[in-house]
Image (spheres, rainbow, N blue to C red):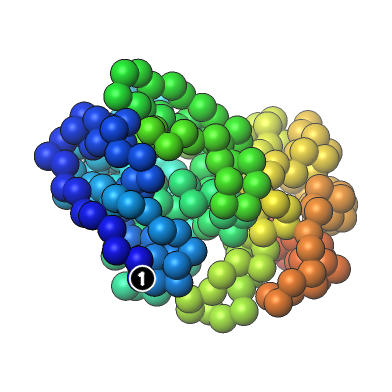
Amino acid sequence: MKEFRALIPRSVQEALELLSKKKGAMLLAGGSDLVVKLKERKVTPRYIIDITHLKELKFIREDGECLLIGPLVTHSELSMSDLIDKYAPVLKEAVRCLGSPQIRNIGTIGGNIVTASPVADTVPPLFVLDATLTLRKKDGERRVHIRDFGVGPQKSIIEPTEMLTEIRVKKMGENEVGFYRKLGQRKALAISKVSVAFWAKMSDRVFEDVKIALGAVAPRVVYAQKAMEFLRGKPASVDVIKMASEVIKSDCTPITDIRSTEEYRREMTGALLIEGCERIFGMTIE
């Protein structure tokens, strides 16, 4: 591991000042990803700015029709939050199947987003919950929709002097349903081969609106646009969902790698859609 200098700011503003002045600096939040990269020399920062103690970045609170989440909230804290359980159950499902208990205890939602990995578990649920991210720098801030944040594997639009300071998600309402399903090699510690996040607004068992996001089937998390368009305005019937499970396969651009094959990922995307719909609509699809 290459030597670096550790800096410990006392506030978010001080951290932003350091980011603007110290070239080659990286932020340390939970560290579950960064520490591994440091050990493997995949990153060699000159400075590490430790923000793990900044309480300004650790919160879950309501703001009208939205929930506001601080980037330093851990996956365990998300899974135990009553507000997440009530208003963002899709996100709760995702964090509960993320990594080991140790990783859930130290890994943060902000870190999971900023790594810009196509297999990040929290990102597909945030897609379907219409999340916006606040990116702040020393002299200003901007808000971006999460769909515009990642541009490729481990690549995003965040600038070296910016910090993620808030995640804003829309609350799920009474007539809204959703699920998160993923397929990994092992039940524990699984990195997704395929993941599907689903949200729908229903009216008399008809899909009034639908959002579906797919992980690990493209260079970044993507919306399943064709399947979404297919389902809107149709009833939540066995036949419709079976047809949607075929349509969704054309929303994928998966690759073959050490974890899985292109063909298997495409097939499992449809299977996960069926599995999730069976649960939320109380049906059996053969």
Residue 19, given in percent of the width and then of the height, sits at: 31, 36
Residue 245 image position (x, y, % from top left): 81, 55
Can you say whether 65 is above or below 36 in the image?
A: above
| Vertical position of residue 68 compared to residue 43: above or below | above
Q: Amino acid at mark 1?
A: Met
Residue ranking furthest to the top:
140
Give the residue displayed 33% in from the left and 52% down from the top: 46
**In the drawing, does residue 272 fall left or right of residue 16?**
right
Q: Position of residue 47 (x, y in %)?
A: 29, 50
Which residue is denoted by mark 1 in the rendering? 1
The answer to whether residue 44 shows anywhere in this view is: yes
Q: Is residue 286 left or right of residue 165?
A: right
Front-most of residues 96 and 107: 107
Towards the viewer: 231 or 265: 265
Picture residue at 56% right of the left edge, 70% below the top: 191
Residue 15 vs residue 117: left or right?
left
In this rendering, does residue 93 appear at all?
A: no
Q: Vertical placement of 9 versus 78: above or below? A: above
The local crowd at label 1, few if under 14, some if 14 to 19, many if 20 or more residues have their Cα within 10 Å, is few
Instruction: Classify the position of the C terminus by image quarter.
Output: bottom right
Residue 80 sits in quarter: bottom left
Q: Nearer the viewer, residue 19 or 54?
A: 19
The answer to which quarter of the image holds residue 180 is bottom right
Q: Position of residue 179 (x, y in %)?
A: 57, 53
> What residue lies at 68% left-to-right and 32% top-to-bottom?
209
Q: Which residue is rendered at x = 80% and y = 35% of the image? A: 229
